[in-house]
Amino acid sequence: MLELVRNAPSKLPTTTLTRSAGNNMPKLTFVECNGSSQTIEATVGLSTMKAAVDHDVAGIVADCCGAMTCATCHVYVDDAWQSRVGVPADMEATMLECVVDPQPNSRLSCQITFTDELDGLVLHVPKRQF
């Protein structure tokens, strides 16, 4: 649950959103091909690509900034998460034909919208994007 916090003193109150105690930001883990991992906090409603770019995750290039025209945000969805993440739509599937070493669990991270249900999601970054 989000609480509104008003900062004072000011002629016009400033309102910011903060999470209540006990409601941590959902987590997302990127595993590099060398086995090292980076767990980040992800904002619900944004793409996992945006979260990766915002946290400087190595290997997520995102040349097109999420416009689904470059496939440089390619990831492999961890086996334990495939059913929750789902399958690519037709346009994404077409773009995945252009990636290096496509696998059945390949996805474009720009097309995975992060939700509370994906808290703990694990994505593997390919050895190279192009």
Image (cartoon, helix red, strand yellow):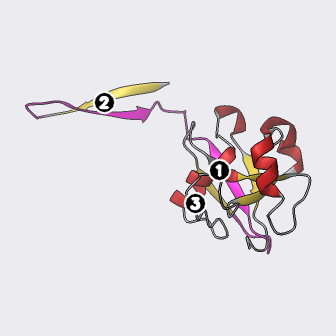
Q: Earlier in the sequence, mark 2 or mark 3?
A: 2
Residue lying furthest left in this view? Answer: 11
Q: Which residue is mark 2?
A: 5
Mark 2 / mark 1, whichever is N-terminal:
2
Label 1 vs label 3, nearer the camera: 3
User: Measuring 84% from the left and 59% from the top, which residue is drawn there?
Assistant: 97
Q: Nearer the viewer, mark 2 or mark 3?
A: 3
Is disc 3 placed on a helix, strand or loop? loop
- The magenta stretch is 9-37
* Residues marked 1 and 3 touching at CB (< 8 Å): yes
Pointer 3: what residue? 64
User: In the rendered structure, which disc, 1 or 3, sits on the residue that comes first in sequence?
Assistant: 3
Residue found at x 57% / y 37%:
44
Q: Amino acid at mark 1?
A: Cys
Amino acid at dot 3: Cys
Image coords of residue 58 (percent x, y) = 64, 70
Task: Identify the residue shown where x is 58% and y is 60%.
Answer: 64
Q: Residue at x 75, y 68 (%)?
A: 32
